[in-house]
Amino acid sequence: MQKGINVAIAQTSCKVADKKTNIERMKKGIKQAKEKAANIVIFPELSLTGYVCKDLTYELAEPVPGPSTRLIEKEASRNDIHIIFGMLERSTKAGAVLYNTAVLIGPDGFIGKYQKAHLPTHSVFEEKRYFRPGYAAPIFKTEIGNLGMIICYDIYFPEITRLLRLQGAQLIACISASPSVRRGFFEVLTAARAMENTVFLAFANLAGIEDGLQFWGGSRIIAPSGSIIRQAKYDEEDLIMAKIDYSDLERVEVFVPALRDLRPEFFNKLEKLAETL
């Protein structure tokens, strides 16, 4: 496993419900990332279809792995690169069951997926109308490190990033479709999740406008100290890359020993109190 890797974020805008166009944009981002010698390129939430699909969600969803993941597998193999992107997933067991999913693909093919656990259903969001929440938080041991994935609203819930870190995650990718009104929240929360878990965090956000909803971009790669290593432009497409060194995790853990000082007995109390809300 490599100790240092080059992480790229392709901050894209999407053409809603047009997989062909969006895949072409992803191919462009993959090529640009490879030209910068990236080991992994990360795309935003639902980058395959766009976020505001509404009732088209049902016809756009497909199995994972499936037709679209196979197309991206070819690009990963051709460019010898790892890729994370977001898509609408249809369950292979029940066709009406859909997930908001992050997919991880490597040069040798499909590696794994994460299904969004926390589904916002308030203000402009209506994800529970379409999606079933995921119930697993896996990490993936790859040649470029131990990788975890979360999606957008998951960042508000520190338990899930803590779980990934305790399973050994070195880099957590948070793919997102955060609208401009939430910018301040995400700028704080992404730094906090990295700092409290002493983990590298890559936040890949959509840019552009879909059905009147503006996405603010601002994608960033964050060090385990909480500092921003590299940040993308606001409100427009961009591609950023940074080299991260996993040995930094140990150095920061000595200075901020949050994992050492965990009090797991409080976790049980949290579960009991949450049941009474």
Image (cartoon, rainbow, N blue to C red):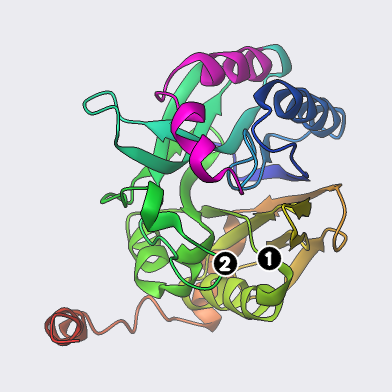
Q: Which x, y percent locates residue 249?
A: 55, 64
Circle 1 SS class? loop
Q: Position of residue 205 (x, y in %)?
A: 69, 55
- Is 149 on the left-hand or right-hand side of 269? right
Q: Mark number for residue 124? A: 2
Please name the residue that numbered disc 1 is placed on. Answer: 179
- The span from disc 1 to disc 2 (Cα, nearest Å) is 9 Å
Q: Amino acid at mark 1?
A: Pro
Residue in view at x 37 percent, y 47 percent: 131
Residues packed near mark 2 inside 10 Å, few (<14), some (14 to 19) or many (20 plus) = few
The amino acid marked with disc number 2 is Val
In the picture shown, does residue 277 fall above or below 118?
Answer: below
- The reply to whether discs 1 and 2 touch (Cβ–Cβ < 8 Å) is yes
User: Looking at the picture, how far across and down is residue 177, in whole percent?
Assistant: 63, 56
Label 1 neighbourhood size at 10 Å, few (<14), some (14-19), many (20+)?
many
Residue 276 lies, in percent from the top left, at 13, 86
Q: Closer to the N terminus: mark 1 or mark 2?
A: 2
Relative to 205, 201 lies left or right: left
Residue 274 among those drawn in magenta: no
Residues drawn in magenta: 52-77
- Which circle, 1 or 2, is nearer the viewer? 2
